[in-house]
Image (cartoon, rainbow, N blue to C red):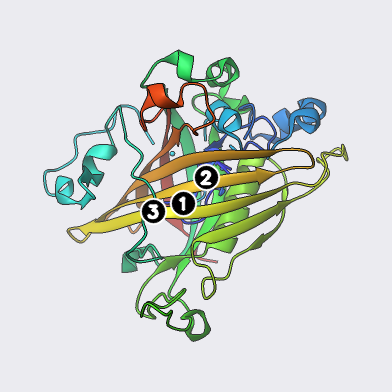
Amino acid sequence: MTRVTQSGMCGTMQPKSAVRLNSAWRSRLILPRQSGYQSKSKRAMKTNSKVDAHNASVDTETSVKTFSRRSMLKNASVLGGTAAALSAVPEDVLAATWGGRDLGELITARTITNPGTAFAGPSQLYYPDWLQGEWHATSKFVAFDAPLGNRFVPAGALESIKAPAEYGGLGNVVEYDLRYYPPAGDELGAPSAFGFSRGAPPKDKVVADRKVNTKSTTNAFMGYAAVQRVEYDPTVSPTKLVVQFSELTPDMQPVGPKRVELFINNRAGQSVGEDVFLCSELYRQVVIGARRVDVTDYELISKYEHRTDGSVEVRQRSVVYLQPQDNLYFDANNRSVAVYDYKIDLARRTE
């Protein structure tokens, strides 16, 4: 999950932020979220600013709720994730499948396989009507697992999980705002040569405000206003976001230019009954710094439950996969090497 933290919620959180420069993305940012899983708290940020400035490599939705594989693994959260012992999923929820993968089962599964890039299908993830509006999110990091064993996870990531909650360890709580809305007419986009609209969310559909959600979740997980701007135009490229980060930490320590390019390579969503929504988005996060480029693949899997009082409970997982250049890539065989779980409560904003 930022996790730049990612933008939607299935897209928010986040991996926590690698940028944090040692935090994990959790992501939603875009996240979700990513470097050394330290806390998102301002106190942690202040204490570790010099270390962060040195190790910065840039959590979700949105994380909503890391930036490099190492960062993300070390992070527990972004932009930027959900709980280890989740309750049993009703059988009707298990009916939601994605390319042979059961979205309901993925909420509790220990081992998850990378779904790969989708070359057809919708370019947007559509949410249920009851999610439309502005929300205040309270996200708690509740569990971490290394399904293939600790040798697939950097030692720093494992240590960060044991850190006090206020420094990003288990129990860490982060708050941020999210927005979901029906797209305006000028966001519908023109048809492509294949007959599909380029950005084209239909007017009667609800989508995540990726620009707002990505910035909100990433800053929350980083512990300060780390994001300068988010570039996203669904009419041109609905599956790509660019996040530009500040070149200074809160105590004015320089970290150099850094940006994150997020590519949403696969997505799936399905409503189960009137009050349950399952979704998943696969991200490729490219962190571009002054002298290096880091690439991370992660997936945000979420289950939204609309409560009778109007609030929403979200169980979100930030799942990390290895890259071909990683030494253990073939041993992992496309399976998840780290899973961060989050429990998120959404309260509708009334302001």
Spot the residue most to the left: 91
- Measure how far apart labels 3 and 2 are at the Cα level: 15 Å
Q: Nearer the viewer, mark 3 or mark 2?
A: 3
- Measure how far apart labels 2 and 1 are at the Cα level: 6 Å
Q: Which residue appears at 16% of the width and 45% of the height?
A: 94
Q: Give the labeled residue for mark 1.
A: 11
Q: Along the line of sight, which residue is nearer the eye, 178 or 188?
A: 188
The reply to whether residue 79 is visible in this rendering is no
Give the amino acid type for the residue marked by disc 2 in the picture: Pro
Q: Which residue appears at 63% of the width and 26% of the height?
A: 167
Q: Are the residues tagged 2 and 1 within 8 Å (C-beta)? A: yes
Circle 2 — which element?
A: loop
Q: Give the labeled residue for mark 2.
A: 32
How busy is the neighbourhood of tag 1: few (under 14 within 10 Å), some, or many (20 plus)? many
Give the amino acid type for the residue marked by disc 1 in the picture: Gly
Q: Give the labeled residue for mark 3.
A: 266
* Earlier-in-chain disc, 2 versus 1: 1
Circle 3 — which element?
A: strand
Residue 250 in which image quadrant = top right
Question: Where does residue 255 sit, x and y in percent of width and height?
Answer: 82, 39
Circle 1 — which element?
A: loop
